Amino acid sequence: MFTITPCSPSAPELQALVAELDAFQQQLYPAESNHCVELTTVAEGKIRCLLVHNQQAEAVGCGALLLQDNGEGELKRIFIKPSSRGLKLGETIVAGLEAEARQAGCDVLRLETGIHQQPAIRLYQNCRYSICEAFSPYQPDPLSIFMVKHL
């Protein structure tokens, strides 16, 4: 049994998971292709963060939604600890972030992921995200895949 709960961008459990994600991505991509966002720098009211906990109350997954002024949002920092992968927790996080987006009035969600993260790409495709062109603030990057979903 897993629970998904909102949290602050500065929550220690979230920060620990993001650090693990950063370490993983640094092994896959050069710095110029690592499009990391420091969640604590996003203006209050423009971000929603979620944590997934297992039965032992250990944080095993996370994700964030950055809200834009144009009615769009961007999914960021979606990560599941390797020990908890394969349990559909990615889908749970995406669904939770999509619910947050709808509640905030978003009608379009976008994301950027890396070409070497095939499980993540499959996750987003299974959640009905489509490949699209680079979107602001990104530039085209041969190591990135950009995706969009209309809610």
Image (spheres, rainbow, N blue to C red):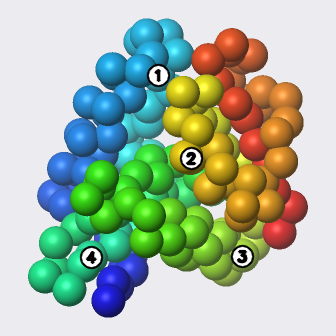
Q: Earlier in the sequence, mark 1 or mark 3?
A: 1
Which amino acid type corresponds to the residue marked 1 in the rendered image?
Asn
Q: CA distance from mark 2 to mark 1?
A: 15 Å
Q: Are the two marked residues, 1 and 3, in contact with CB atoms closer than 8 angstroms?
A: no
Q: CA distance from mark 3 to mark 4?
A: 23 Å
Left or right of residue 109: residue 59: left
Which amino acid type corresponds to the residue marked 4 in the rendered image?
His
Q: CA distance from mark 3 to mark 2?
A: 22 Å
The quadrant where residue 58 appears: bottom left
Residue 123 place in picture, x, y as percent: 62, 56
| Tag nearer the camera, 3 or 2 | 2
| Tag nearer the camera, 1 or 3 | 1
Q: Earlier in the sequence, mark 3 or mark 4?
A: 4
- Few, some or many C-alpha atoms within 10 Å of disc 4 (few <14, some 14-19, many ≥20)? some
Residue 87 seen in render: yes
Task: Return the residue at label 4.
Answer: 53
Q: Which label belongs to residue 120?
A: 2
Q: Earlier in the sequence, mark 4 or mark 2?
A: 4
| Tag nearer the camera, 3 or 4 | 4
Task: Return the residue at label 3.
Answer: 102
- Front-most of 119 and 60? 119
Left or right of residue 23: residue 70: right
